[in-house]
Amino acid sequence: MTVLENVQLGLLFGRADGGSSAAAAGDAAALLESVGLSAVKAGRAGDLTLAAQKRLEVARALATKPDLLLLDELMAG
């Protein structure tokens, strides 16, 4: 899957209200911009560096619109 598709899944299936795929594409692009991954949104997620994969995980988590997001040793693996 691409980087963009990974975040779109979080937007579409990670929330109770769901949403449309068209809206998810725009929201996913905005989230990728906020974590610094907009340049690689069309690339495969598996091809990212470890640091970029961690940023993608944060974007996926933010896509679910959590009330609270706790991060512990984000770069530790």
Image (cartoon, rainbow, N blue to C red):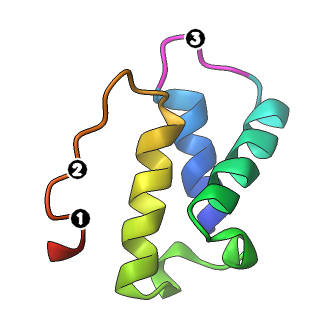
Above or below for 68 versus 61: above
User: Disc 3 and disc 1: Cα gap in Å?
Assistant: 28 Å
Q: Which range is magenta?
A: 15-19
27 on left or right of 75: right
How far apart are labels 2 and 3 at the CA level?
Answer: 24 Å
Residue identified by numbered label 3: 17
Question: Depth check: 13 or 26 in front?
Answer: 26
- Principal SS element in the magenta part? loop
Viewer-closest of 31 and 45 = 31
Which residue is drawn at the image coordinates 46% and 29% (left, top)?
A: 14
Residue 28 drawn at (x, y percent): 68, 47
Are the residues at dot 2 and dot 1 in contact (C-beta closer than 8 Å)? yes
Q: At x 38% / y 81%, what residue is drawn?
A: 51
Q: Residues within 10 Å of mark 3 (few under 14, many from 20)?
A: few
Please state the horizontal and vertical placement of residue 72, each as a whole percent of the image: 14, 55
Q: Element under label 3? A: loop
Q: Which mark is residue 74?
A: 1
Amino acid type, label 3: Asp
Q: Is there any visible trace of residue 29 in the rendered image?
A: yes
Q: Is residue 51 magenta?
A: no
Q: Amino acid at mark 1?
A: Leu
| Residue 24 in which image quadrant | top right
| Residue 33 vertical position relative to residue 38 in the rendered view, above or below | above
Name the image quarter holding the N terminus: bottom right
Q: Amino acid at mark 2?
A: Leu
Labels 3 and 1: the sequence-earlier one? 3
Q: Is residue 29 above or below residue 77?
A: above
Q: Which mark is residue 63?
A: none
Residue, disc 2: 71
Mark 2 touches mark 3? (CB < 8 Å):
no
